[in-house]
Image (spheres, grey):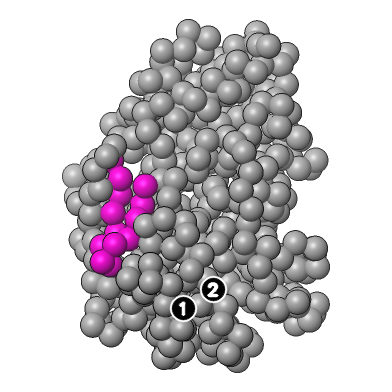
Amino acid sequence: MKKVDNKSKWVVLDDDPTGIQTVHDVAVYTDWNKDTLEKALKEEEKLFYILTNSRGLTASKTKELHMELMSNLICASKETGIPFSIISRSDSTLRGHFPLETDIIQKCLYDGLGIETDGLILAPFFYAGGRVTKDNIHYVKYGDELVPAGETEFAKDETFGYRSSDLTEYVEEKTEGRWKAKDIIVISLDDIRNKDVDGIVKKLMSSKGGVPIVVNAEFPGDLTVFCEALYKAICSGKKYLYRTAADFVKAVCGVSDIPLLSAEDMAVKRDRGGVIMIGSHTKKTTSQLERLKGLNSLEFIEYDSDKVLTDELGEETVKVSKIVSDLIEKGITAVVSTKRKVLTLENDTKEDALIRSAKISEAFTDVVSKLTVTPSYIVGKGGITSSDIGTKALRVRRAIALGQIQPGVPVWRTDESSRFPGIPYVIFPGNVGDEDTLLNAVNILQDEERN
């Protein structure tokens, strides 16, 4: 892996667990107390993740979390003498607490370490998910068509919606005019394809005051060229913060490619069933669920998430968990999904919708907490769902990202102190893959189990 200097670490603050979808053999921490961070900084690897799950939190909770985390990280850095660089990893479809999170990180770096951020690198490119940036327009791939992000379902998100597909205009929109589109530094595809490293360095060196820097990218190699220039600017003394999707982490840290994981790689047990928890409501997830129903070896259960309105989620959780436990013991894999239609209320607010969504996710993932048998594997579908399963249901404190079972679909190995030690936990983003990607992943788990 690449590094800033001989001691410095890359620390990725991940707003949901899907950010490890391009790396392997990397530690993921789910708490950020000072002792944990000191241990993480002292580890041999130059990269580690901290799972914040902030995309599932309100703005006030996100601010509180980041201030606490940064305070502890700065204290741990001073105690160990090990410096760090922060990557704020978020959604490749532009959803998340931006610019709130990067504003807090920048302030904490200045207040705690006297570090003034020259520029904020924005690189939402994610190849496996079909998210590319050309002429500053960020696109989401649907089949063979590239759709401007501002015209997709993701831009209509109840909590993190936006209008602009042009990233310079997106920044102006999200910062409410604090940064104007015309003032943002742009690293164009022409700069990258011409391999004008010196020209890119010149643009990076001109940054000051935390100015956003938009990076265009269409293929993974584009980020490689950019990172060559970035390291030259860093070595010249420039300081950057990063708001990116998963591919940037792979490029800047020089993470190697490995084959997709097999059931043997994941050490899938063959003597019992697994459980697949589907919470995401994206159209892609729903179509993937429908394709999954073609497998006769699975048992499908709908979790009545609308019971959030009658305070009966607890009873629903107990009922469903018992059914799933019985199936697992019989060697049958259970697929549990929330209702496919998003619950909307008249005169609803973004804050209320997020709080209600968090309640549903907590109760839904509590199905895993209440299992009375150990499953052979767990699949969590959706960012908030997979995070709640990992941190609350499985009580994972430190996991190892093994790699990917499908492009963009990462797998954890749970730690010994977790609820189900050593099992593979497949973290399946709600917005990744085509109609067959979930089916392909489950086939790997199921077919290998039966061999």
Q: Which mark is residue 197?
A: 1
Q: Position of residue 20 (x, y in %)?
A: 57, 51
Q: Residues within 10 Å of mark 2 (few under 14, many from 20)?
A: some
Residue ID at (64%, 43%) = 258
Q: Which residue is disc 2 drawn over?
A: 228
Q: Are the residues flagged by discs 2 and 1 in contact, CB closer than 8 Å?
A: yes
111 above or below 386?
below
The spot of residue 108 in percent (x, y) is 56, 81
Q: Residue at x 58, y 90 (%)?
A: 237
Mark 2 residue type = Glu
Residue at the image position 42 percent from the left and 77 percent from the top: 196
Based on the displayed image, in which of its 4 quarters is residue 446 positioned?
Answer: top right
Badge 1: how crowded within 10 Å, few (<14), some, or many (20+)?
A: some
Q: Which sits in the foreground, 255 or 50?
A: 255
Circle 2 sits in a helix, a strand or a loop, which is it? helix
Query: Residue at 41% of width from left, 46% of height from top?
Result: 129
Above or below, 356 relative to 313: below
Give the residues drawn in magenta, as a range: 130-142
Residue 240 lies left or right of residue 189; in this view the side is right
